[in-house]
Image: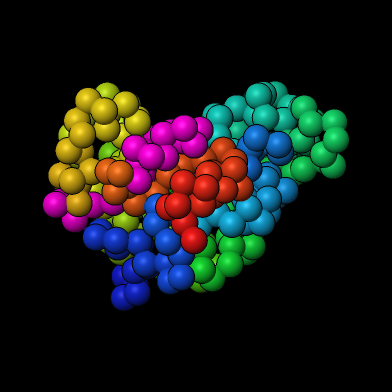
Amino acid sequence: MTAAPQTRMPLSPTRMLLPGRPKPYVMAHRGNRVTLPENTLVAFERGLQDGADVIETDLHLSRDNVLVCIHDPTVDRTTDGRGPVAQMSLQELKQLNAAARYPDVPAQQVLTLAELASIIPTDVALALELKTDRFLEESVCQQLVRELDAAGIRARTVTLSFSLPRLQAVTRVSPDIPMGWISLFRFWPLAQVQLSGPLWPALLVNPFYVWIAHHQGQLVAPLDPTPDSRLWLYCALGCDAVLSDDARATIAALRRKGYRP
């Protein structure tokens, strides 16, 4: 059984509706990963403290089918463990320290999607990058939607991926969740998605990219986790959101340049 669409869509095909928050929205990339271990509770809490409009994270599934916030298919880079995420149970993942490479940061567990969703304020959106082909499975997409519903955040969620089929699989289960397609070498927005995330040089190669996307009823958030030196470009072109490894610094830069009150 597929989930019924919700009627309220703060992230819609034509605009982001985040009341009281000026564009371009700032999307905290894996939390604040400049000073804290990425995709951990402390990193996400810092991103919220920084004033981020959107929290971005990455999703894999554990061996026992729990949605967890981790970027890589293995735990090797970001924890003190080794091995594929998909071959570890949630209990095994929870025994790892995701802050092992940060001696001044208390130990951090691998976070579940449910744990992250529970701390997102009602005026902040959630962007979920689908990192595995498990999201091609209808049951996994249904599980994702159920968790978003349980947390009351489905209407403020957008999915992201380099894989269009993964996005489409979620859309078949929940057509109201906008799709955000990330691309590295495409200089023209893809028509069937609601948000385009081109690698930022695409906006130089095609300065009409944002105009075309808006004409197609899409949002644009360039793939650029260190955007501060290019904010003038993104604001001049009318980008809807910017990705940032350090939301506090990006928001401060937007204010200095007069793009935020």
Q: Is residue 258 left or right of residue 90?
A: left
**Side (left or right) of 164 relative to 152:** left
- Residue 208 found in image quarter: top left
Measured as percent of width and height from the top left, residue 176 is found at 30, 64
Observer able to see residue 91: no
Estimate the x, y position of residue 194 in percent, counting from the top left. Answer: 26, 52
Which colour scheme appears in the figure?
rainbow
Q: Residue furthest bottom?
A: 7
Residue 211 point in image, percent of width and height: 18, 46
Q: Is residue 224 rendered magenta in the image? A: yes
Q: Residue at x 46, y 64 (%)?
A: 21
Q: Nearer the viewer, residue 58 or 240?
A: 240
Question: Is 235 displayed left or right of 124 in the figure?
Answer: left
Q: Which residues are magenta?
A: 215-235
185 in the magenta segment: no
Q: Between 240 and 188, which is closer to the camera in this rendering? A: 240
Q: Is residue 214 visible?
A: yes
Task: Pinpoint residue 75: horizontal percent, then vertical percent.
Answer: 65, 29
Residue at image location 63% in from the left, 53% down from the top: 50
Q: Foreground residue, 83 or 114?
A: 114
Q: Give me the residue at 66% from left, 56% from top.
A: 49
| Residue 18 sits in quarter | bottom left
